[in-house]
Image (cartoon, helix red, strand yellow):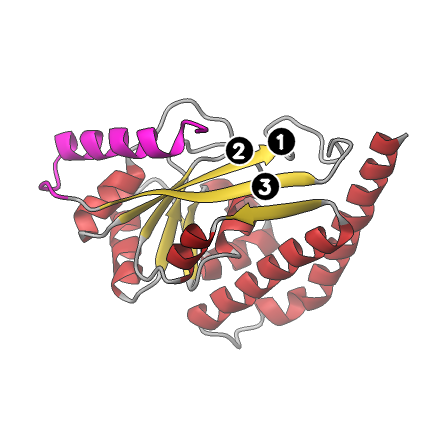
Amino acid sequence: MRKARRALLSAAFFCAYGALSLLFAPLLILPLWSKRTFRALIRFFYRAFVACARATGLFRVRIDEASLKALAGARGKVVAMNHLSLIDIVVLIAHLPDSTAIAKPQVLRNPFLAIVAKKMFIVNTGDAGAVVAAAAGLLAQGVNIVVFPQGTRGGETLHRGAARLALAARRSVLCVRIDYSPLVLAKGQPWWDVGERTIEISLALRATLSPRLANTRAAAKALTAEIACAIQSAH
């Protein structure tokens, strides 16, 4: 019975938040905002999502003071995080100042998402050089770039994108670990499967890595291994 009530709570929450987002959608797609302002608006919606979920008892985020301070003060950093749930990016950007992420090309298939993605994210269309150049330009402006080395939720192999970007732009990598208890919105998991209690989400800065080597394939491989050590183990 409790699980059924939680499922209904989840349905009501996502429907209400979705309806509210649709009310503001026409404002978002109008050519009124600079990209920086647009990122700030999206971050506002992400922070509202986290706050409302906490208020309803759907989930709450736990983050230690040192991690919170480090993320709040991040400027022009590559942020590498493990990827478990559909809301990973929402939870992370809610705790980061001016930030964007590298998104999959699939977001361009939906007309509305395509408009949002082009303003908010760097869409990886397959040209790695162009993606790195665009991301490096934003890093130089103080924008944080979020990268999921796993590529997809629950992916077992880490890609070298975060390392390549950090080496090319000579920027530090903030290694962040996110965990859920119980896991929610994982790949293949139904949206209504939210367990029988408040979902505990923990967010922690595991390491700050500064590239020390030249921008080579070997250096990217070595840095990716360091990132993997920091974000993959749930210790």
Indicate which disc residue 84 carries: 2
The part of the chain drawn in magenta is 212-235
Name the magenta segment's main secondary structure: helix
The residue that disc 3 covers is 201
Q: Is residue 146 above or below residue 198?
A: below
Marks 3 and 2, the one that precedes in the sequence = 2
The mark total stands at: 3
Q: Are marks 1 and 2 in contact (CB under 8 Å)?
A: yes
Q: Is residue 177 left or right of residue 138?
A: right
**SS for callout 3:** strand
Seen as rendered, the residue at the extreme front is: 65
**SS for callout 2:** loop
Seen as rendered, the residue at the extreme left is: 214
- Residue occupying image coordinates x 82% and y 48%: 12
Q: Is residue 1 above or below residue 77?
A: above
Indicate which disc residue 183 carries: 1
**SS for callout 1:** loop
Q: For mark 1, does the 10 Å Cα neighbourhood hold few (<14), some (14 to 19), or many (20 or more) residues?
A: some
Marks 1/2: CA–CA distance:
8 Å
Quarter-wise, where is residue 77 in the image?
A: bottom left
Measuring from the top left, give residue 226's x and y in whole percent: 26, 32
Q: Amino acid at mark 1?
A: Leu
Q: Could you tell me which quadrant the N terminus lies in?
A: top right
Q: In front: 19, or 94?
A: 94
Asked if residue 228 is among those painted magenta in the image, a careful observer would answer yes
